[in-house]
Amino acid sequence: MTSNDSHIKKNHLTISLIILFLLFWGLEISDKLTYYFFPEFSFSQFIKAVVLIGFLIFQIAIKDYKFILIALVTFIFFSIGQLFLETSFTRNSLLTFFKFLFPILLFSFVNKRIKINKLSPEFYKTFEWVMVVNSILIFIGALLSIKLFNTYQGNRFGYNGMFAAVSNGSYGYIITLFYFLLRYKERVIKNWKFIFIFISCIFIGTKAVYLSMLFTLGYLAYVSKIPFKRTLLVVAILIGLLLAYYFFFQYGIFNSIRQSDGLLSALLSFRDQLLLEKTLPFIQESWGWVNYLFGGVSDFDLRSQMDIIDVFFFWGILGGAFYLFIFLKLFLPFKMNTTGWLFISFLAFIVLLAGNFFVYSFVALFMVTLKLKLEESMRTPLKQ
């Protein structure tokens, strides 16, 4: 075996993750292009299904009994909930089950491989450059008002480059900001890629990203060596509150929503209404006591778009608690310090208010990046 072959074998986890990330980034681009130019044509779901089946076969082939057991238990929970529905095992419910399964499968794969392979820097370089390129497209979209690069359809402000789904763009940039903070620590303010990406976040137009920008600034003020830290933090919080007041009570679309539908609808972007008008009526009409334990959904499009609630909508109380426990256990199979929990707690807060965190496959790849960087930072703790 040549030294080059040995290097490839040693770093096949890196190569696998680079291929996966670029593949799913390509599918995201494809989805956005086809939506605008060929809306009747899309093959991304087929490719993602092939990837999922390939991972399943691989995990079974290497006898990953832990994952096999988890997959079996989740399928049993899913099946129990479906059996007590009038319309069960629909195409929508089966697809949603496999979407929920994908991040667990991906975390299991990485956990198994990382024990025998060291991740090389090439993956992180690929990740950073993909986000830089997309940020360039955001700036171009904002400067030239290119509709293709819009975050939203319609007149709402926002540019997210080539992210097809709003949630993918939001979570992608939130996790990217966290990644830079974890990797470069207080030195991040000298990193041009971080500064460029951070400024591009201004144009994305989602509340989740703006909250993360404020979190990032507050965290940088805390870990840096500048004087008057507490004063600056108080000033940053006051500025955030003043901006929130301006956009929700004085100007723009959120002020209009507040005036017509109330402050809660403006804060949650109508997710409270989805919960009251779609999710809860389905539960009241279709669920028995077994479904409250194990869930049961015929059409996941009836979800509230508040993801923690939606987990229990799909899985029920018992099934949802099991799923969240397994997700967290596989995502963080290592001890966390206070700083790590700060990042995870803030992300959990965002997930509580936003949707599609668990069922979008590209988000799972961003979470793998965060997971790997968190694990590395636990070995080299951030300065407090």
Image (tube, rainbow, N blue to C red):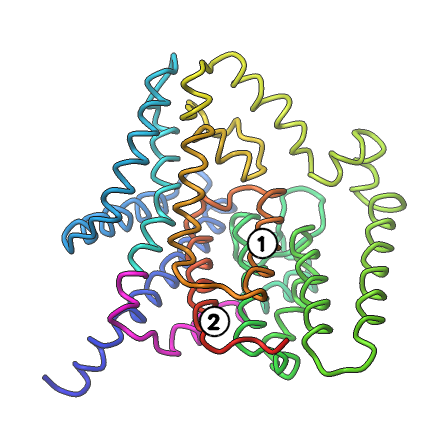
Secondary structure, magenta segment, majority class: helix
Left or right, residue 63 beside residue 71? left
Left or right, residue 227 beside residue 141? right
- Residue 129 placement (x, y as % from top left): 49, 73
Q: Which residue is mark 2?
A: 378
Neighbourhood count class around disc 1 (C-alpha, 10 Å): few under 14, some 14–19, many 20 upward: some
Q: Which residue is mark 1?
A: 347
The residue depicted at 68 percent of the width and 53 percent of the height is: 158
| Chain part drawn in magenta | 111-133
Residue type at mark 2?
Met
Find the residue positioned furthest to the right: 250
- Residue 13 placement (x, y as % from top left): 28, 68
Q: The residue tagged with tag 2: helix, strand or loop?
A: helix
Neighbourhood count class around disc 2 (C-alpha, 10 Å): few under 14, some 14–19, many 20 upward: some
Q: Quadrant of the C terminus?
A: bottom right
The residue depicted at 64 percent of the width and 23 percent of the height is: 276
Q: The residue tagged with tag 1: helix, strand or loop?
A: helix
Query: Is the residue 329 above or below the residue 382 in the image?
Result: above
Q: Quadrant of the N terminus?
A: bottom left
Q: Is label 2 or label 1 in front? A: 2
